[in-house]
Image: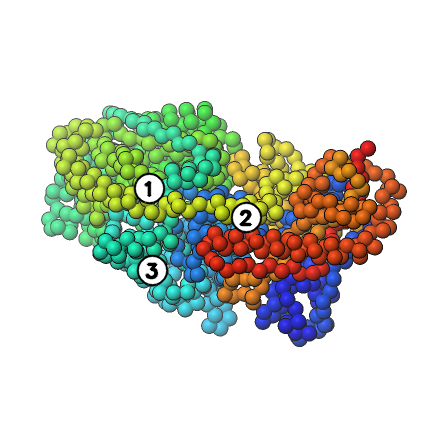
Amino acid sequence: MTVENFSAGEIVRARGREWVVVQAGETLRLRPMSGSEEDIEDIIPELELSTVSHASFPPPDFERRGGREAAQLLKDALTLSLRRGAGPFRGAGRLNFEPRAYQLAPLIMALRQETVRLLIADDVGVGKTIEAGLILREMIDRGQIERFAVLCPPHLVDQWVEELEDKFALKATPVTASHAARLERELVGAESVFEAHRFTVVSLDFIKSLRRIDDFSRACPEMVIVDEAHTAVSAGAAKHRRFELIKRLAEDEERHMALLTATPHSGDEAAFHALLGLLRPEFERIAEAGPDERRRLRERLANHFIQRRRADIADWREPGLFPERLSAEVPYQLTGENEKFFREIIEYCAEVIESEAGDRRQRLAFWGMLALMRCVGSSPAAALRALRNRALTDVEDGDVEAAAAAALDDEEFSEDDLEPSAGLNDPRLAGLISKAEGLTANFGRDPKFQSLVATLKRFTKEGCQPVVFCRYIATAKAVGEALKAEFPRVAIDVVTGELTSEDREKRVEALGSQRDKHILVATDCLSEGINLQRHFDSVIHYDLSWNPTRHQQREGRVDRFGQKAKTVRTVLLYGENNPIDGAVLEVIIRKARAIERETGVRVPLPDDGGSLTKALMSTVLLKAKESRQLQLDLFAQARSEAEAIEIAWRNASEQEKKSRTVFAQSTLKLGDVQPEWEATRQALGGFEDVERFVAGAMKRLAAPLQLKGENAFAASLSETPETLKERFFAEGLEIEKPIRIAFEARPPSGFASVHRAHPLPAVLAETMLEFSLEDPDGPDDPAVLPRCGAWESDGVENVTLLLLLRLRHRIEARGKLTAGFSLAEEAQALALDARDLSTVLSGDKAMSLLARESGNIPAQVAQRYFEMAPDVLGQIDLVLRAYAEERAQALSDAHTRFRRALGSEAEARVAPVPPVDVIGYYVIFPKV
């Protein structure tokens, strides 16, 4: 036989076992009848040593029987093994979490487009990674794409790889500078890394060289996700190369692309419109278009751009999505030697700037001195490092733009937590260094640090798990060491940019799993990348960032989707008599909050090259030097500069406010598709189903779950049979010690969330179903579930035959890469009256009989019903076929409704693939 003799959904025999045809195209794509998606094989029938033939599914062994509990386990194993669900959401069966309704909105927008072009600009912590993953999973399962690449900053690569595998069952290959050599050694001939690996997560720093850009452009997958997309369109040589790469990819009109950013509008109009131009070239012209064309372009852009704040998401009426945030500002006073040292630094910096000749040297000196003052305000340790660095560096070596961007906490420098050098060698440095050394040696008495200790004592007493964010490595280390002396019973660790991304993640995870109380001290290397909501619920800004977006990013690491705490606390420390802190706090940070409250939108400071901030700080620095006093209100004397910042900011915010009314997608409601999503979720099983199955399966395997708290458990996989242990190990689960799990979206700290696609239920379900259907030689194996049983129940009035069924369907496929049809499977049930074999219940109502209270029945009472079972199955063949037709029609209607909601007029075609598989055969007697 050839491929043409087979079609999706049919059962075939090949290589000595039964398979289900998943796809019939150039090859036969087969999945073992009782195996998993990982066991799929592609074969060419003509090249097989033995004939590939049609086959049928074996009936149950009517001599091997069990009770209701075993039947429930088999039903759950069947349901949780389904990966190719029959509902309109084809990817739902591979998800290891339950998406919230608002996270489906970008997916609906994507499915409405022939070629996906989306800019997803939801707020920090809303779940852009999840929204992009839902699109990837759905498009793969619909056959619209076979390959994808995620382009992201290097520090986000590991997080993307982990999220894709943990939540979406997509095993992506990380492509970074450290992985490149090994990956390229494994290539064959002229093959590209991106051809050899279907799914990749690629560091933008790795791909930016001209040679690699050309290779990637040539072998680029059909779908590309660009994370932190705003970093590719701003000024700078590295960003220019990124933009040229992404623009080249976007020029292929058939390539699917999704751009992700929480800050699409950074205040740079040209950069923002360049970003929009990646969606469609005409969108770049919006700013210069006339009123009518601008209105038309914005209406078209609304199909490609979604941007929502927390308030917009609240409109979806899903309570408890995010915690309540309680914010506070905590002042401290510079006193004694600390105050004197800061005053001397201000005078020194002002004199250095005045003494420099030439515009370029003066600008470099200004930003260098500003960075030095920031170090002094951060900690004596950071000041000491900066002063020592300064003695070794010549101002002529500097880059003005880079110095300004670093001082202003530009997004590009989130990984840069080193203390800066500041310029020329100077004999005055020796005295300043000596004073910094003395203050560093007595850091425990630093007023700022003492203020932190007081805040942390209150937090730990209230049960909070805080993250302390510092600007510089030296500060973070000094704070971490001093805190260990103050809190000997609290687990404390420090994470800085000195560690690799992988090591940072390991340190965070180890700290979060150590004790009930823990404190993490980190630099801004963690303000993006590693999500901290599993183990932490509070943020303390030890150092003010001069970029309000950086504060939002820090807080967004814990205040985000999945945070289990009901309340998140944030505290901002500032020097009450530090004029620099005063200017930043009042003119930048508080103004950002005020504008956001008034306009309802959050926009980065539109400060081209730092010109506005430079004017402000120049005046503050001058006044501070002249007054010889450190007063918080010195910035008030720089009122004109502060007003210039506010005017520019407010104008940008008002423009953004007008934009948000369109792009918040408030008109996009899920009412039409929500029923289909709920039906899909119910058919595939939720957290409650997973918990019931795992608890029952582990108990049957003599390794019951151990309760470790409310809804929290420990599972000892080492006590399970060897075959299962091997499979658990292959999936990366811990065998030697119990794993800590919880069956909820927000698990307790240190516990993993377990949903249907998590390796634990996935391995249990697939193994138990496989063993039960293949009927191996070891019937006493607890993993083998009987496919027959009898019991009494108050759910029936007459003796009832309950049939647990697996139905296969062929669904007309929309994908460009599929062979016309795709396979779908569903678990169903029929309840028949044993007297005349008429249908009593079907679907969920029939399945619910497995959940009713039950009692045992003597074996001899049910014997004759099992003796009659082969004849009964022969008699009801037409009933099963009719039910399969009924289900196919219901699915056709659901798919058609879904397509209508997406704006398509096409009708869906779903056809049953006979025969119906009878997985279980049960006799239920009425309770007397």
Q: Identify residue type, mark 1.
A: Arg
Determine which residue is flagged by label 2.
676
The image quadrant where one finds the C terminus is top right
Residue 280's disc number = 3
Instruction: Identify the element where label 3 is drawn.
Output: loop
Asked if residue 344 is positioned above or below residue 224 in the image, the reply reads above
Query: Mark 2 against mark 1, which lies toward the viewer?
Result: 2
| Quadrant hosting residue 244 | bottom left
SS assignment at label 2: helix
Q: Position of residue 709 (x, y in %)?
A: 59, 31
Residue drawn where x is 50% and y is 60% of the image: 906
Q: Secondary structure at mark 1?
A: helix
Find residue 910 and report its horizontal and vertical position in percent. Answer: 60, 59
Q: CA distance from mark 3 to mark 1?
A: 30 Å
Q: Residue at x 29, y 27 (%)?
A: 331
Side (left or right) of 623 relative to 6: left
Which quadrant is home to the N terminus?
A: bottom right
Mark whose residue sits in front, 3 or 2: 2
Residue type for callout 3: Arg
- Mark toward the start of the polypeptide (2 vs 1): 1
Residue that label 1 marks: 550
Residue 744: x %, y % from top left: 56, 38
